[in-house]
Image (cartoon, helix red, strand yellow):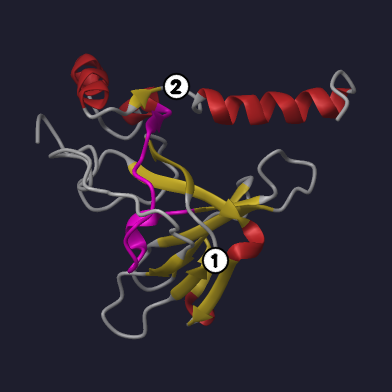
């Protein structure tokens, strides 16, 4: 595993394997009885690890695992009454189970925000296998704010690279292109 747990699904090698045609699944919180269930009718895109301190992480993990899906593909199918927004003052409204604390999905309500069309989910909550493996790690330096020693950052970046997870201190180049395209259209410098 190394000096500490990055995430249980990558600590000993990336343990996620995509299946052609994966079209979604059901996310389930950690409650033993009456768990929240969220159906996702879409492949999980841009799967990645995140070192920020806002996202839900499995116990002992330094990183969360997140993917993006179209927001209209997310449907709470059981125990909606148990969901609450973790911090309504944040831009990303993270809906978590009131009982176990697991974040089920997050959305941005600001219609002109680049990520408004998406919901962000935690793929490891899926009871259905076949979603794409994570391909990068975002906000790696933020792991320091989560308790990782600055002295361990060289090891962390090296281990992420060994695992095939490019380490970034923002998003991947593909997601940054989406952000820049949105900004260029809003400024009128890109017409499409």
Residue with the most extreme front position = 20
Q: In this view, does 188 lie to the left or right of 156?
A: right
* Residue 149 rendering spot, x and y as whole percentages: 22, 23
> Mostly what secondary structure, the magenta segment?
loop
Which image quarter holds the C terminus?
A: top right
Q: Name the residue under label 1.
A: 41
Residue ID at (31%, 75%): 31
Residue ID at (57%, 66%): 74
Instruction: Name the element at disc 2.
Output: loop
Residue ID at (47%, 63%): 24
Q: In which image quadrant can residue 140 be found? A: top left
On screen, 11 above or below 160?
A: below
Mark nearest the camera among 2 and 1 is 1
Front one among 57 and 118: 118
Q: Mark 2 points at which residue?
A: 169
On screen, 11 above or below 121?
A: above
* Residue 4 rendering spot, x and y as whole percentages: 14, 35
Residue ID at (65%, 31%): 178
What stretch of residues is rendered in magenta? 121-139
Q: In this view, does 72 lie to the left or right of 132?
A: right
Which image quarter holds the N terminus?
A: top left
Q: Please check the rendered image and state whether residue 129 is part of the magenta-colored stretch, yes or no.
A: yes
Q: Please check the rendered image and state whether residue 48 is part of the magenta-colored stretch, yes or no.
A: no
Q: How many labels does the image show?
A: 2
Front one among 103 and 26: 26
Instruction: Name the element at disc 1.
Output: loop
């Amino acid at each position: 595993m190394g000096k500490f747990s990055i995430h249980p699904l990558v600590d000993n090698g990336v343990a996620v394997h995509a299946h052609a045609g994966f079209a979604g699944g059901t996310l389930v919180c950690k409650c033993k009885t009456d768990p929240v269930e969220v159906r996702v009718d879409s492949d999980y895109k841009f799967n990645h690890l995140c070192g920020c301190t806002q996202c839900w992480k499995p116990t002992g993990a330094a990183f969360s695992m997140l993917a993006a899906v179209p927001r209209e593909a997310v449907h709470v199918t059981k125990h909606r009454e148990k969901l609450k927004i973790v911090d309504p003052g944040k831009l990303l409204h993270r809906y978590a189970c009131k009982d176990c604390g697991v974040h089920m999905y997050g959305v941005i309500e600001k219609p002109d925000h680049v990520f408004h069309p998406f919901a962000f989910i935690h793929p490891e909550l899926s009871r259905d296998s076949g979603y794409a493996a994570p391909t990068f790690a975002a906000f790696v330096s933020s792991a320091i704010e989560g308790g990782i020693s600055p002295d361990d950052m060289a090891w962390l970046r090296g281990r992420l690279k060994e695992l095939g997870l490019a380490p970034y201190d923002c998003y991947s180049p593909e997601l940054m292109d989406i952000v820049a395209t949105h900004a260029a259209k809003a400024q009128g410098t890109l017409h499409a």
